[in-house]
Amino acid sequence: MVGIILASHGKFSEGIKESGQMIFGPQEDVAAIVLTPEMGPDDFYAKVKAAIDTFSQKEEILFLVDLWGGTPFNQCSRLIEENGTDGWVAVTGLNLPMVIAAYGERMGSDSAAAIAKAIFPEAVAGVRIKPESLQEGLGAASAPAAAPAAAPVGAIPPGTVLGNGKIDIAFARIDTRLLHGQVATTVTKMVNPDRIIVCSDAVAHDELRKSMIEQAAPPGVKAHVVPIWKIIEVSKDPRFGDTRAMLLFETPQDLLRALEGGVEIKEVNLGSMAHSLGKVVVTNAVAMDQDDVETLEKCAAMGVKFDVRKVPADSPEPFDAVIAKAKAELAAQK
């Protein structure tokens, strides 16, 4: 795996490493090196070199640095020139989208150069202004990439068959927070959907939440919020045969209604269910009440396989064991 050095003035690199871990999970062979006021250039150089010596491999190293021309960059450059290989590459302008993109890219690439090329546009696209009207005229880098076209249903006669005539549900997840950083970056990178579809009656009728979710979509992907009846309708519409979708459900009850309506989902990531009155905590991210337990069991009885984990980097927890723990905890409450 490509090693990553996060280098900065002050504790910026440590903070961005922690933020990246919150979104993408713990990462091996990643080190944050900070330049403090009492350190000289040689001190920083030595710290970076020592960190690289701890990595499992040293042929491919990606340096993500805060400023071009600053001491962290200059010493990383010196290290590359004096000790590096052709696989040592530096990128400046360190930001969180850059780090998250790098984590995702290195899951499928052993080349620091290839990762550097892939993360550059995502790092730039992560710089946006709200209100968006202020971005007008600031250049191509200020706007996110256009989303791939999905089936323009309004322009296609009913009954038209696109692709194989069936929407490709590439990923489905239960998450109280729906579309947030972990999903918008980590999961989207892995699934590569055309569309993120939030399936919730409650959110579909809440204009504020709906607007926030639509704005939270990552660059190049369109987010929609639909009621449960609509996703049932979409799943049976042949005009969506060219669409690759990620479905997000706020509750297991919404998922069950979709399944009962004929939406074909074989596997669901049980990512996060928030704690509230009457619920018991069964994992670090999932809390359930009796209705949740019964609903999830009904979904499982319909053939759904549950992958219980908050982020892809986590180890999955056995669904049966999670349900058994919930039942025991709920029984103890009585």
Image (cartoon, grey):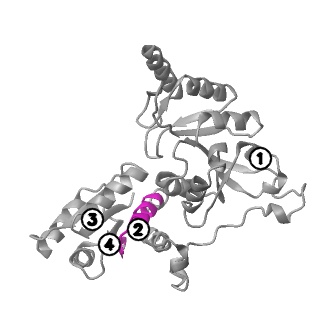
Q: Residue at x 89, y 58 (%)?
A: 160
Q: Nearer the viewer, mark 1 or mark 4?
A: 1
Dots 1, 4 in contact, CB < 8 A: no
Q: Would residue 1 be found to the left or right of residue 76 on screen?
A: right
Of residue 15 and residue 275, the one placed in the foreground of this image is 275
Q: Secondary structure at mark 2?
A: helix
Q: Position of residue 95 (x, y in %)?
A: 38, 68
Q: Secondary structure at mark 4?
A: loop
Task: Give the residue number, with chain letter if any, for mark 2.
Answer: 112
Separation of marks 2 and 3 at Cα, in angstroms = 22 Å
Of residue 202 and residue 219, the one placed in the foreground of this image is 202
Q: Residue 85 — which label?
A: 4
Q: Residue at x 43, y 60 (%)?
A: 100
Q: Nearer the viewer, mark 3 or mark 4?
A: 3
Task: Give the residue number, with chain letter if any, for mark 1.
Answer: 235
Task: Give the residue number, with chain letter if any, for mark 3.
Answer: 12
Span colored in magenta: 87-104
Q: Would residue 11 be found to the left or right of residue 85 on screen?
A: left
Q: Residue at x 64, y 28 (%)?
A: 300
Mark 2 Cα shell of 10 Å, populated few (<14), some (14-19), many (≥20)? many
Separation of marks 1 and 4 at Cα, in angstroms = 51 Å
Q: Position of residue 270 (x, y in %)?
A: 54, 37
Q: Earlier in the sequence, mark 2 or mark 3?
A: 3
